[in-house]
Image: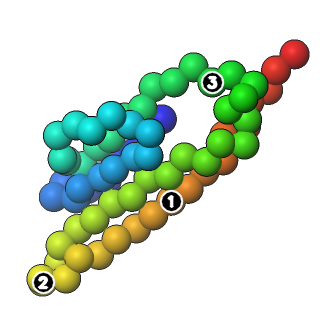
Amino acid sequence: MECEARAATVVTLNGAPAGPLGPRAHLQLSPSAQDNGRCLSCSAELEVAGLVVQKHQTLELRVLCE
């Protein structure tokens, strides 16, 4: 999963290891049946004219198993 925003934006992705702050966060995983229904979220922050603007997006992981 990758979370990306415009330049000068700080992006975080839940579950991703802490890394350098920047406009991209990356999480690679091999999901199992236990991960079905797990929620992953991406948050971005941008400072504009002294105010911090935030955006959050969440998705639910669906794992198809046989």
Relative to 30, say whether 61 is above or below.
below
Q: Is residue 49 above or below residue 47?
A: below
Query: Please, is residue 65 above or below residue 8 in the view?
Result: above
Q: CA distance from mark 2 to mark 3?
A: 41 Å
Asked if residue 6 is positioned above or below residue 13 in the image, the reply reads below
Residue 4 image point, x, y percent: 34, 47
Name the kind of residue labelled 3 in the image: Pro
Residue matched to label 3 = 31
Element type at mark 1:
strand
The mark found on residue 57 in the picture is 1
- Residue 10, image x, y percentages: 23, 56
Indicate left or right for 10 with 32 as reference: left
Work out whether mark 2 precedes mark 1 in sequence or the reverse, and give the earlier one. 2
Q: Are marks 3 and 1 in contact (CB under 8 Å)?
A: no
21 to the left or right of 31: left
Between the C-alphas of marks 3 and 1, the distance is: 20 Å
Horizontally, residue 59 falls left or right of residue 16, namely right
Q: Nearer the viewer, residue 4 or 30?
A: 30
The C terminus appears in which quarter of the rendering? top right
Which residue corresponds to mark 2? Answer: 49
Q: Indicate left or right for 32 with 27 as reference.
A: right
Determine whether the residue tagged by mark 2 lies in a helix, strand or loop: loop
Q: Are marks 2 and 3 in contact (CB under 8 Å)?
A: no
The residue lying furthest to the left in this view is 50
